[in-house]
Every structure is written in structure tokens, then in C-alpha cells.
Image (cartoon, rainbow, N blue to C red):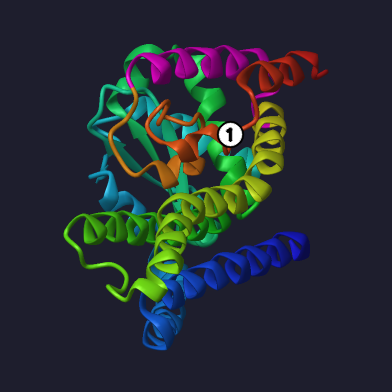
Amino acid sequence: MFKNQLKTILLLGLLSGLLLWVGQLFGGINGLSIMLVFSLLMNLGTYWFSDKIVLKMYGAKPVSKTEAPGVHKIVEELSKTAEIPKPKIYLVNSEVPNAFATGRNPQNAAIAVTSGILKVLDKEELKGVLAHELAHVKNRDTLITTIAATIASVISYIAYMAHWAALFGGFGSRDNDRGGSDIISFLVLVVLTPIVAALLQLALSRSREFLADESGAKYCNAGLPLASALHKLETAANLLPLKGNSATGGLFIVNPFRGQALVNLFSTHPSTSERAKRLKAMKF
């Protein structure tokens, strides 16, 4: 638990520092001051409302036992095995098969599945996916990834705003002496900062995915169903990428934003083949 908390502090510090630097680059000392206040409020807000932010971002709706009895039954059984409270269950109306967990702790957690995943996976594969997400909840990875995704999304959005501001002549100075530096600042802001933000997410997410795979397989007493599910989900993501903010890709069990942006060259997940290899090698 201490290691997880330390990683959270490190991630918040690095990403928040990057956000402050972007503010200074975009608006000088005034921009820095604005981003300082903004980052403090945002970090506080994402800590308390991270689950609501992400669920709203993808239009997730709570699903009852009557509407999805199979999902509720699996999550109830796995929650007892993992010795954590049963998370709330949400449904994302999307044919892209995927799932994610969110929430600041096991007492305030939620698991969301897309309508597509219920059609593509069999019962054992779905159980493996849900066990993986419950492992994220128990390990408190949901807080780390949600805060990282929220801050990275803001950085990407600022870079996007800078791009459009430049197109309409709203970025940089008309002073010839500063023209060169403004161009460099613009390129750093628009091109490099989203990549750096993605790399900071990457630094924490890969090891946590391996751990969630291992823990989830132990909850199910089997690794093969999750390995099979991962291959199916990756194939679907390559054929039909999800529409959304690519900075949130680390929240999902398989990155659903294949080929959308430069930032996706730096995957927040280990390779599916390596994950499957480790799962198949597990002994029970």
C-alpha cells in the first residue's frame, strides 16, 4: 500500500509540474499562476470525483441486477474472493468490447463494461476480465490511473487549443525578435508535451497491468480464460477503435485507441502476447 501511495504522489507531482510548465509556456507568469491554482483544484477534484468524471466521459450508466444478472453474480463472487466490497456496476453503450475500473479506493469503486464485451466474451473470459478489474480496485490502481488520465487529458486539450490558436494567429508574438522562440515554444507545447504526459502514464501503468493480470487469474484459479479474452479484445480494438480521449487509454484492460494519435506510439499496456504468455505459464 505504501508503494502505491508513493507512486501516486510521484505521478501527481510530475504530471502537475508538467501542467504548470505548460501554463507558463502558454501564458507566462499569469499562465503559471492560473495553472497552479487549476492543478491544485483538479488534483483535489479528481481524488474525490475521479469515478464520476470518467464514467460521465464515456456515458456509463448504472446497470441493475435485473438488467445484467450474470455480471452482478460474477462480481459478487469475485469480490468475496478478493475480500473487498462489491463495486458498483456500469454499462457503456458501445459495440467496442472493453472494460475499466475507477474510484479512489475499494469502498468507492466502480467497474464499467461495454455492451460489446457482453456479446464477444464467453462466461469464463468475462470472469477473467472482471477479476482483472477487481484486482486494480484492490491494489488501488484505479486512483493512480484515473488521476493520470485526467491530468494528461487536460495537457492534451491545452496542446489542442494552442494548435487552433496558432491557426487563427492567437499564439505567439508578432515581434520578429521573438518569432523564432515563439515557434519553438509552440512546437514544444503542441508536439512534445502530450508525448511526455503519455510517457509519465506509461511509467506506472505497465507493471500494474501485469500485477492485475496475475491477481485476477488467482481470483479465478485460472489464467487461460483471461489470456483468451485479451486476444479477443485486442483484435476488436484494432478493427474498431473506441471514440474518446486517447489519454484515458490506460484505464481500459486493453488500449481501445489504436492508431488515433502520436501519443499511442507509447502504449500504456504491455504487449498482449507477453501478458498472455505469463498467464498461460501460471500454475494453480
Q: Position of residue 105 (x, y in %)?
A: 54, 60
**89 left or right of 85 in image:** left
246 vs 11: above or below: above
Instruction: Judge whether residue 44 can be spotted in this image.
Output: no
Q: Residue at x 40, y 74 (%)?
A: 178
| Residue 167 picture quarter | bottom left
The secondary structure type at the circle numbered 1 is: helix
- Given residues 27 and 20, the one toward you in this image is 27
Residue 89 x/y as whole percent: 36, 42
Number of numbered tags placed on the structure image: 1
Which residue lies under the disc numbered 1? 132
Q: Nearer the viewer, residue 206 or 122?
A: 206
Mark 1 belongs to which amino acid? His
Name the spot of residue 236 as percent of width and height, x first.
40, 15
The residue shown at (62%, 67%) is 14
Residue nearest the viewer, comparing 78 with 200: 200
**Relative to 128, is 19 above or below?**
below
The image shows residue 5 at horizontal and vertical percentages of 69, 66
Residue at position x 20%, y 63% from top?
Answer: 169
Res. 122 image quadrant: top left
Q: Is residue 282 above or below residue 106?
A: above
